[in-house]
Amino acid sequence: MAGKKVHWILPVLLAIGLFLSGCGARQEPPKAAGEVIKVGIRKDIASLDPGVFGKGGPDSQRYLIYEPLLYLDQDFNLKGRLAESWSSDDQGKTWTVKLKKGVQFSDGTPFNAAAVKFSLEYLAKSKRIFWPLERIETPDDYTVKLVFKRPYAILPYDLTTAEIFSPTSFDAEGKFKAPIGTGPFVFKEWQKEQELIFESNENYWETKPKIKTVVFKVIPDHQTRAMALQSGEIDVADYLLVNAIREMEKTGKFSIYRKASPCMNWIAFNTYREPFSDLRVRQAVCYAVDVKRIIESVVGREIATSALKGPLSSPAHEYIRKPDLEWYTYNPDKARELLSQAGWKPGGDGVLEKNGKKFRVTLIASTLYEEGKAIAEAVQADLKKVGIDVEVRVLESAARFDALKQRNYDLIELGGICPHNDPTPWFGYYFGTQRPEYCVLENRQIQELVNKLYSTVEPEARRQLFYRLQELLKEQAPGIFLYNQEAVTVARKDLRGFVLEGGMPGTYSYLRTISLGS
C-alpha cells in the first residue's frame, strides 16, 4: 500500500505559487549522473519535528537539516559546528557558548542566540533533553549562557545531539510546520514508509555538498536492501547483515566503511529477586557464557567488538577504559564452583536445584536488532551446560521495556544509550538515580560515582571515576556485557570523499562530503 505523501511548504513559496502540493504532472529536468545519491535505510523516520524522538533516539537524517552547536569528528573529538567556543568557569553549573557569525537558516532568517534559546527550550519542553536546566540567558546576539540547577559536566557532549532550528519552523500557535535549519540540505518530499528526499542547501554557510539530491529509500528487509545495493537501485546501505557484507567485500565492487560505536548490547540480570539477587550466581553466569564465540559466530566480528573488556570495550571508550582491569572470561568450571557455593546442586535431569526448586529462568530477547533471538539462544545453550534451564521469550521494544520498568524478568537483552561517546548517561540510566524505573542494580557506591560523573568537569578526575566504576561493575556483575555494534556502511566503489563523524548524529555525515565519479 502506498504511503501518504507529505509536503512541508514554506509559506513564501506557496504565496508566490512556485510549488503546488499534489501536482503530479510537474516536469523537472533530469538529474545529471552523480547529482543524486540513493541511500537504503531499514526504517522510516518518525518525524521532522525536532521535538519528536524516533525509535531509539532522534532520527539521524535530521542532522543534515538541523545542525547542533557541537559535533564529534571521526576520532570522537569534540568540535564546534555552530559554536565558536564553549566553557564553564564554575565546575559545570554555568556554561557559556559563543556562536559562529555569518550563519543563516535555509530560509534566510538569522542564526543567533535567540534562535538557540528557542531551540533548546523547545527540546526541553518536548522532553527531548533531560537536562537539570534552570534558565538560558542571551547576553548578546552571539552568546548563550546556560545556567543549571546543579553542575552538569556532560553538557558539551549533549550539545552534539541537540538540534538547532529556526523559530520560523513553527506557526503563530507554536505548532511545527516546516523543517528549517542551518544544515547542508533542505527538505523536499516525504512519502511515508517509502522515501524521504532532501536537496542541497544552496545558501549553506560552510562548504556546500557536492551532491544535489539525497533519496532515503525505506527498505526494511535486510536481504532486499542488500540486493538493491548490488543491483544499483541504491548507492549506499547501512545495517546490513554480516553475510551480505562479506559477500559484497569479496566482489571488489563496494567499499566498506566502519565506525566504532559506543553503544553496548548486553543482558541485564534482575538483581531484585532470586536467583540473581545472589552475587555468586551473577558472577557464575558471567563466567558461563562464551561471549567471544557467540559474537564471532552469531553477530560477526566485522560489525561488532566483543565486550571482552567490560562495558567500555568500544574503541570509542579507550580514553576512559581501565587498562589493567581483567574482565570475565569463559570459564564454565569456575561457574559451576560459584553456583555450588550458592547452594545450587545438580538434579537428576541435569538442571540445578536448591531447596527443592529448579534453576529455571526466562531470558527476554530483543527485536531491536536482527541477532537478538539468536544471541539469546546461544546464551541459553551455554547456560544449559552448567545446569541452568533458560526459556527464551522474544518481545517487541515496548513490551520489553514495560517488563524492565516493572522488573518482571530474570534476564533481559538491552541496548545502548549512546548518542555520543561519553557513557555517563548510559551509566545513569541503568545504574544511577536519574531514571529509577530503569535501574537494574541498586548500589550506593555506584550511584555516588555516577552522580560525581555528572558534576565533575576536569578530564583526569572523570577518568579516575570511570576507572573505579568499572571495578565496581566487575565486582557486582549486573549483567553479561556482549558487544558494541559498529556502524558499518557499504557503498559503491566509485563513491569518493567518504567521512563518518562520530556519534549518532554522524550516521549520515558522509553526505556532506561525498561525490560520485568514474
Image: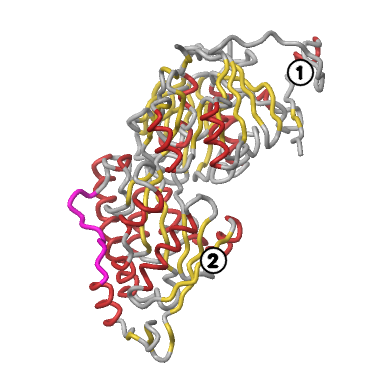
What quarter of the picture does the C terminus occupy? top left
Image point (44%, 44%), residue name: 418
What quarter of the picture does the N terminus occupy? top right
Q: Which residue is mark 2?
A: 393
Indicate yes or no whether the magenta region holds residue 326. Answer: yes
49 with respect to 437 (left or right): right
Crowd around label 2: few <14 · some 14–19 · many ≥20 (10 Å): some
User: Going from the N terminus, do you reach mark 1 or mark 2 first?
Assistant: 1
Rendered view: 35 above or below 218: above
Indicate yes or no whether the magenta region holds residue 148. Answer: no
Image point (33%, 53%), residue name: 311
Image point (24%, 42%), residue name: 460
Residue 221 visible here:
yes
Q: Tell me the SS state at disc 1.
A: helix
Pick whichever, 484 or 218, lies toward us: 218
Span of residues in magenta: 322-332
Q: Which residue is mark 1?
A: 11
Amino acid type at circle 1 is Pro
- Circles 1 and 2, Cβ within 8 Å, touching? The answer is no
**Percent coordinates x, y for residue 156 in the rendering:** 41, 34
Rendered view: 261 above or below 184: below
**Percent coordinates x, y for residue 481 in the rendering:** 36, 57
